[in-house]
Image (cartoon, rainbow, N blue to C red):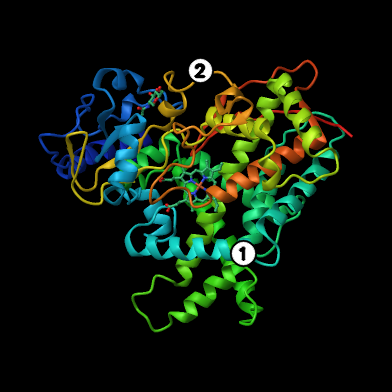
Amino acid sequence: MGSLVAAVWRALHPSTLLLGAVVFLVLANFFRRRRLPKNYPPGPRSVPFFGNFFQLDFKQPHLSLQKYVKKYGNIFSMEFGAWPTVIVTGLPLIKEALIHQGHKFVDRPISPIRERIFKKNGLVLSNGQIWKEQRRFTLTTLRNFGLGKRSLEERIQEEVCHLAQAIKEENGQPFNPHFKINNAISNIICSITFGKRFEYQDEQFQEMLMLLDEVIRLETSVWAHLYTTFPRIMHFIPGSHQALFSKWEKLKLFISREIEKHKRDWNPEETRDFIDAYLEEIEKHTGDATSTFHEENLIFTTLDLFLAGTETTSTTLRWALLYMAFYPEIQEKVQAEIDGVLGQSQVPSMTSREFMPYTNAVVHEVQRMGNILPLNVPREATVDATLAGYDLPKGTMLVTNLTALHRDPAEWTTPDTFNPEHFLENGQFKKREAFLPFSIGKRVCLGEQLAKAELFIFFTTLLQKFTFKAPDNEKLSLDFRMGITISPVNYRICAIPRA
Ligand code: HEM
Ligand SMILES: *[C@@H]1O[C@H](CO)[C@@H](O)[C@H](O)[C@H]1NC(C)=O
């Protein structure tokens, strides 16, 4: 009897289970493989069943495929699990796909992780009617709040004051600015969606931001990739993908609590914020079964705004402070421009940007070097399409390589070195076509204007008030951490008050 139990136990040992799972998934995948057209872009041979899974360096996926660009040119294919993917390099081809043939690549691939949490709802990763209606509504509503009683610009100026105060309290001692910056940037989108900002000491909100940071990291873990490739199996296997699901649930709960509060003290006479506007929109469509405005979508669209509007800008700002500490002579030049145009008392605004070409160029250069979304956000062929003479069947994932643009030696004098001169000509600011951190086309970043205002006003205000430098006897590093965005590894910095 004992030996039977032992034998069963041995059979159920995790590694045995894993082996069984692998065999099962190999078979399952075999029957799912799609047939690709003859005239499909060339690419590295994929391993049966696993695709090109093992060719990807998960620590730096955006850099690991250079050899294929060399070998195959500006368009090549790979396969991730059962997902055929085409990777496009170079401005002409990126514009061809995202602008001239934009309507054919307007969808997003929905990963099994996203599908399980969001169904098909939301704004950033939704398609068809749901996406169209959510995007139109959100754009209009953001514009209305921008023109409302308190302009978006004022909200930004007010928030950066709070941030400066919190930084001042560090007394010039080394500190990690990560969560303060995150909180401040997030407060801008919170004031639009929830109608309020959160104190930097608010524990519940701190937990939210921590969750946000974690889901962003876990989304690109090997476990998440495995789930994406083999969802049906991974569903039952423990691993960090399971933590990911529970963290998403907590984020959803936070948003739905805010929505409940809004419903309780809702006054149809006064639209306070995005949630109020959305609740009105739901009312307008009551009885219309085809409407995509319902409470689920309110949760997911709000969550999407929160996610898209926090991590990106906050990461860019963290790069900005790091680069300033790294290049003190550039920081001095920015401060000289600030002192000349604004002095210590005038509050930076988007109007003052016109008179500050150097500072503007530095912010652009931070975005070029930071390159926080190295492979853009993927698109998917909505219909059968032809690109650069190759056939891309409906459902092909399209990845556009923004890194190659932002580091193209033909475009930039010092592609791998921080150099604001890239955006200057005779002392004036110069726009660059090969600079696309917000992407282009029908799904271009919805928050581009907001993000630009946040970046300029935050950056300029902080440099007006502080000089950033490395802690004594510590060396700062420009190493990055890979997640949904490329972010600097956590660093400590000193903010020395200037006044
Ligand atoms: C430095 C900051 C930011 C960067 C670099 C950035 C970049 C991007 C990129 C590359 C995309 C994909 C566009 C495409 O597929 O062509 C995107 C989409 C999006 N971004 Fe941003 N973003 C930033 C800040 C923001 C902010 C502050 C918001 C807040 C409103 C926001 C909201 C969105 C949304 C909602 C989408 C999805 C649009 C759609 O699918 O239709 N972003 N962003
Ligand atoms: C994107 O371009 C960069 C820079 O040229 C290159 O190192 C990287 O391998 C490319 N990535 C892909 C996925 O093509």
Q: Position of residue 402 (x, y in %)?
A: 42, 32
Instruction: Kindly indicate the quadrant of the structure image that contains residue 44.
Output: top left
Task: Mark 1: give few (<14), some (14-19) or many (20+) Cα within 10 Å.
Answer: some
Depth order, front residue of 106/488: 106
Task: Give the image quadrant in which the ligand numbered 2 is located.
Answer: top left
Q: Nearer the viewer, mark 2 or mark 1?
A: 2
Of helix, strand and loop, which one carries label 1? helix
Q: Is residue 387 visible?
A: yes
Q: Residue at x 77, y 32 (%)?
A: 175
Q: Quadrant of residue 356?
A: top right
Which residue reaches farthest left?
38
Residue named by callout 2: 413
Judge left or right: residue 247 versus residue 41: right
Quarter of image, res 397: top left
Callout 1 amino acid: Phe
Give the spatial CA distance, label 2 vs label 1: 41 Å
Q: Residue at x 50, y 60 (%)?
A: 139
SS assignment at label 2: loop
- Residue carrying label 1: 145
